[in-house]
Amino acid sequence: MPRSAFLAAVLVLTTGAAQADNFANIDLHSVESQQTCMAQARQALVILAAENGSDNPDITQGRWSTFGWDLPPRAADISIICPDIDGVTYPFATGHTTGDDNEPGDMIERLAEIFNKL
């Protein structure tokens, strides 16, 4: 099973256990195609990482999802999915962190700002 498919399955299966960790979700503006969404997702994660001091972020991509791993400043894992529904791509981002007082909400909001300006 590809890493991205496995991680998407884990995210779906662990939503009930989310109380132990910190999650933040946000809808992003619809885009013209999955290809556009995937390019914007990668670019947004690179920009977000650079703003926080990382010039070489760990980013992987699947067929319709993009993942950023251990992004500073909160060591957040961020996934951006780009599902195509009836010819329109509706991107959605989820951030995950661990530890007390380590909410990823501000990072997800900043990611949305970047993504929606691209």
Image: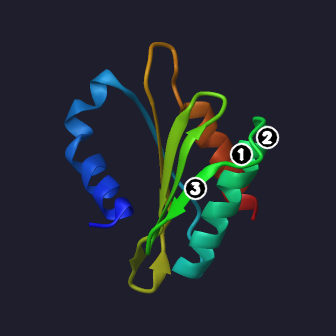
Q: Is residue 48 above or below residue 6?
A: above
Residue at the spot of label 3: 59
Q: Which residue is nearer to you in this view: 73 or 58?
A: 58
Q: Amino acid at mark 2?
A: Glu
Q: Secondary structure at mark 3?
A: strand
- Measure how far apart labels 3 and 1 are at the Cα level: 12 Å
Front tag of 3 and 2? 3
- Measure how far apart labels 3 and 2 are at the Cα level: 15 Å
Residue 46 point in image, percent of width and height:
71, 53
For the image shown, how many numbered marks are present on the structure? 3
Residue at the spot of label 2: 51
Residue 43 point in image, percent of width and height:
70, 61
Q: Tags 2 and 1 in contact by the CB under 8 Å rule?
A: yes
Residue at the spot of label 1: 48
If you read the primary sequence from the N terminus, does the residue marked by circle 3 or circle 2 appear first?
2
If you read the primary sequence from the N terminus, does the residue marked by circle 3 or circle 1 appear first?
1
